[in-house]
Every structure is written in structure tokens, then in C-alpha cells.
Amino acid sequence: MRLKDCHNFQDFRQLAKQRLPAPIFHYIDGAADDELTYRRNTQAFESCDLVPNILAGVEQVDMSVKVMGQKLAMPFYCAPTALQRLFHHEGERAVARAASRLGTMFGVSSLATVAVEEIAELAPGPKMFQFYFHKDRGLNDALLERAREANFNVLALTVDTITGGNRERDLRTGFTSPPKLTPLSLLSFATHPVWAWNFLTKEKFDMPHLSGHVTAGTNIAVSVGDYFSTMLDQSMSWKDAEKLCAQWNGQFALKGIMSVEDAKRAVDIGCTGIMVSNHGGRQLDGSRSPFDQLAEICDAVGDRIDVICEGGIQRGTHVLKALSVGAKACSGGRLYLYALAAAGEAGVERALGNIKVEIERDMKLMGVTRIDQLTRENLRFR
């Protein structure tokens, strides 16, 4: 299978599986416990039908949106994800360039493998920095200031990783960051020589935002679940989020909101956006899907804060359904991570291009020329 054969989410997933050693692939592909929530995130869209209108004069379509003050050329952006140089040696550089070329936003994780300063030079478009609240207050202050100095547009505090989810695939494969050599993983690395060559011969794997503060994940191999459980501050509260929002003093979002009550509190502390998200099903298995929760959250706060639907997005029709419910935009991680693993920058550009083409085509088939014409009148739930 080659890049030119990748027409959808599942095609990129298949090619990524071919290109990556098993522990790395299953880190992207896996989720918590029985992975019920992971599957439900996408299945939720299947219980909702689109009702198109016709003869609407759809030759010219404007799919641009404004999200947390940022003008995006399409209503989908790249959610922040960690450790991208494990998936392809270009890592965040590749994603930043592709997202910038497609005119959409790119999220950079606290656990990124390329520094915000370099990303700022590569990607002139809208950028989000994802903030993990560590026990080390000096590290927290450093993360905030580096994002500010690099002129990132949005700060997003992740609030659903107060402890690590039970990612059993990672336990079975022995996945750690950086990768640890075991008899099983060594065999998988050896049978993927291109990945192994790039990982071993390119620049040393690092998480530059953590350098000088912690060694776990960079010099000391650790699972992501263990990192969350030991390095992040489990006492983090609404007061901490409010203080961080005030310190940032700009576009500020909470990533991982799933209840109406929490959405309302996000408005109260001054947030300008929330990501309705369950961390891709990687934390609390058995939790609701973002799409299933979207309507009640949009009804409660959608007129006061930008609501983003994050999780399970695989098609342009999924985006249109979320926008029709009331989301301002959608975001996702696996959609572009499989593409990154499959073919680097060219893969990410093709994946983002595919969903952009799908959104435009589906808008025309729905009989709308602007995003704000999408409403719940276009939807029927089974």
C-alpha cells in the first residue's frame, strides 16, 4: 500500500500499521480498558442522519470559521498530541508545515518532541499550545512563558489526565518513551528497518519543553500512563485553572470537558473555548462520546464560549453533523497521526486535504454555502 492509495482514515491507519513497529502503532491505535469509549466516539455519528436541501446554488462554498479568535480555512484542526517524532522522524515539524499550508490550526503538546520556538518559525498560521499542569511549578511557569514568547495564539489546559488511563495495549507491548528494547520490541524494530534507521540516526529523541526540569520520558524510559500518574499534579483544581487563565491573559481553553456543569464553570473562570473530549477514549473507558454530549453543552454555553467537538472524527460528514449541533469546529489526533506515520509531511497534507475536500463536497450536497447555515434542522436522530 502506498500514499496515493490512501483515500480515508482507515487507509492511513493500514499504512501506518505497515510502517511502524508494533509498540509504536498500538500506542496511537489503543485506548483504555476494553476500548468501548474509543469505538463509541465514532459510532455515535452513525445514529445521526443528515437531511439535505437542494437547488441552493452551491457553486461557491465558504468553509472558513473563526475559533477562539483564529480564522481557519476549514472547520477542522490538528489537536495537540505528544511524542510525534516516535511516529515519523520529522514529527511536529511535518504536521506544523502541513497544517499551515492547509490554513488550519496546529496544536503543540507540552510533551512535544520539537520546541515551540522552532514551530513558530515553521508555521505562520494559528497555533495552540497544550498545557499539562505539572507538580513542578517552575516547569509550569517555563511552559507558559515559552508559549507566550513564541507567540502562540491559544493556550489549552488538558483537564482529563489527572491520572493515567489503563492502556492495556501499552502494557502488553511494553511501550515507553523513549522506546525500551526488549526481546519482543527488538524484533518489531528490526522488521521495520526504515523506522529504526531514522530513529537511531537522526537527532537524539528529546522532549525539549521538559529539558532541565524532568528526565522521565526523555532520558528515563516511562509509559505515558506512569508519566501522567507521577509527574502531573493530582491536586489541580478550578482555582488553578482560573489562575492559569488569568496568567495567560488571552485565548484560553479547557481540553477534556464532558459535562454541562463543567462547561458552565469554564465560562465563569474566563475561558474562551472548551474541547468536548474524552482524550480519544484513552482515559475513562465507559464515558460518553463527545458527539453524544455536544447538544446539551452547546445549549448551555454555546452562545458564550467556542465549543469544539474532539474525538472520533473520521469523515467530513462527521464534521458537518457536529457543526449542525452547534460546535464551532472539530479537532482530532489519530486522523493526522496515522498519516504522519504513513508518509510524514506529505501524508499529513493528504489527510487534511482529504477531509477538506470531503467537507466542501458534503456542504454542496447538503445545500449550504456557509458553515453558519448548518443547523439542527439538517439532522434527525435515530
Image (cartoon, rainbow, N blue to C red):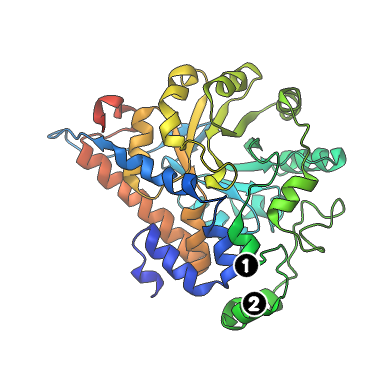
Q: Is residue 333 shown to the viewer in this render?
A: yes
The x and y percentages for residue 127 are 59, 43
Q: Nearer the viewer, residue 96 or 210?
A: 210
Q: Report the side of 115 relative to 331 (left or right).
A: right
> Which kind of residue does numbered mark 2 sit on?
Leu
| Displayed quadrant of residue 243 | top right
What residue is rendered at 38% in x and 75% in y? 1
Residue 93 visible to an observer of this rendering: no
Q: With respect to residue 219, does 322 lie above or below?
A: above
Provide the residue designation for mark 2.
184
Q: Is residue 135 left or right of residue 285?
A: right
Q: In what element is the residue under mark 2?
A: helix
- Within 10 Å of disc 1 (Cα), the crowding (few <14, some 14-19, many 20+) is some
Query: Please, is residue 358 above or below residue 92 in the view?
Result: above
Residue type highlighted by circle 1: Thr
Mark 2 vs 1, N-terminal side: 1
Number of numbered discs on residues:
2
Instruction: Check the image and name the residue furthest to the front.
Output: 34
Asked if disc 2 and disc 1 are in contact, CB closer than 8 Å, the reply is: yes
> Which disc number belongs to residue 173?
1
Screen quadrant of the C terminus: top left
Circle 1: element type: helix
Q: Position of residue 132 (x, y in %)?
A: 71, 41
Taking 71 as reference, is 361 left or right? left
Q: Residues within 10 Å of mark 2 (few under 14, many from 20)?
A: few
Picture quarter containing residue 178? bottom right
Q: Position of residue 232 (x, y in %)?
A: 77, 42
